Image (cartoon, grey):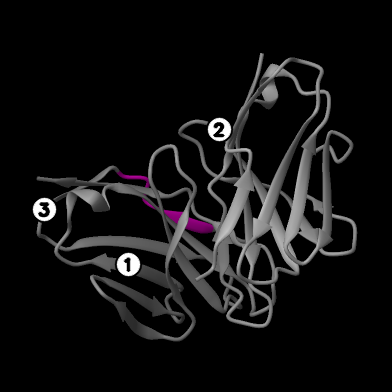
Amino acid sequence: QKEVEQNSGPLSVPEGAIASLNCTYSDRGSQSFFWYRQYSGKSPELIMSIYSNGDKEDGRFTAQLNKASQYVSLLIRDSQPSDSATYLCAERPNFGNEKLTFGTGTRLTIIP
Amino acid sequence: GAVVSQHPSWVICKSGTSVKIECRSLDFQATTMFWYRQFPKQSLMLMATSNEGSKATYEQGVEKDKFLINHASLTLSTLTVTSAHPEDSSFYICSAGRTGGSYEQYFGPGTRLTVT
């Protein structure tokens, strides 16, 4: 059974600080990893995808992947109150159009 | 962009009636679409995988005769909740995988169903 694990939180971070969200996965063969943001009452929104070991940066967001440790993280720099949401980590075993396995999500609160 | 729409955004129906929810990929073709359900403060639950031109694949525990899925074109999938009951009240969300690209999945805005 493939699993994706996240700390459910809540994680509280002061405005302007770096928020660090972590995720581990059990399937060593997984190739594709995604971070989604979900505001309360809304559907998930894709914010980052990462396929190779290392860092991938997009604006204030940096995704980090370490396949040897089966670990994915998301860093949010200069955290804003609008970043307060639940962040979902997801993985897919290969590059085909297959279903994602989601973690249960980490609730992030940015404190003004 | 990669935009997925859903219609309706919310619906209230009486117990015993059927409700159809549409999911459309507006600016890309989607060979595969996925249907999820989410109860308040709970995780996403995948209900079924919908493939264009073939039968949907349902997750364990999801009644295929109750949740009818049709994926008639590369841009449209529908979910019909048949003989709805109050326990079917939930937030139904579809996602679509972009064909021929990075296979990232994009979610629609969701449909909130209330069965009275």
**Placement of the N terminus of chain A among the 4 image quadrants:** bottom right
Q: Where is residue B6 in the image (x, y as percent from the top left)?
A: 62, 47
**Does A7 appear in magenta?**
yes
Please tell me which residue is depicted at 34% across the width and 62% down the height of the picture. A22
Q: What element carries label 1?
A: strand
**Placement of the C terminus of chain A among the 4 image quadrants:** top left
Tell if the residue under mark 1 belongs to the same chain as the one under mark 3: yes
Q: Please name the residue that numbered disc 1 is placed on.
A: A74
- Which quadrant of the view contains residue A89? bottom left
From the viewer's perspective, is A31 left or right of A9?
right
Q: Nearer the viewer, residue B11 or A51?
A: B11
Chain letter for mark 2: B
Q: Please name the residue that numbered disc 3 is placed on.
A: A15
Type of the residue with mark 2? Phe
Q: Nearer the viewer, residue A6 or A17?
A: A17
Type of the residue with mark 3? Glu
Chain letter for mark 3: A
From the viewer's perspective, is A86 left or right of A100?
left
Q: Earlier in the sequence, mark 1 or mark 3?
A: 3
**Numbered badge on residue B19:** none
Q: Magenta part of the protein: which range?
A: A4-9
Relative to B98, say whether A11 is above or below. Answer: above
Q: Position of residue B16 (x, y in %)?
A: 81, 17
- Which quadrant of the view contains residue A26? bottom right
Relative to B13, say whether B50 is above or below. Answer: below
Q: Which of A95 and A31 is in front in this view?
A: A95
User: Label 1 vs label 2: CA separation?
Assistant: 26 Å
Q: Where is residue A8 in the image (x, y as percent from the top left)?
A: 37, 45
Whether residues under marks 1 and 3 lie with C-beta atoms below 8 angstroms apart, the answer is no
Q: Which of marks 1 and 3 is in front?
A: 3
Type of the residue with mark 1? Leu
Q: Please name the residue that numbered disc 2 is placed on.
A: B39
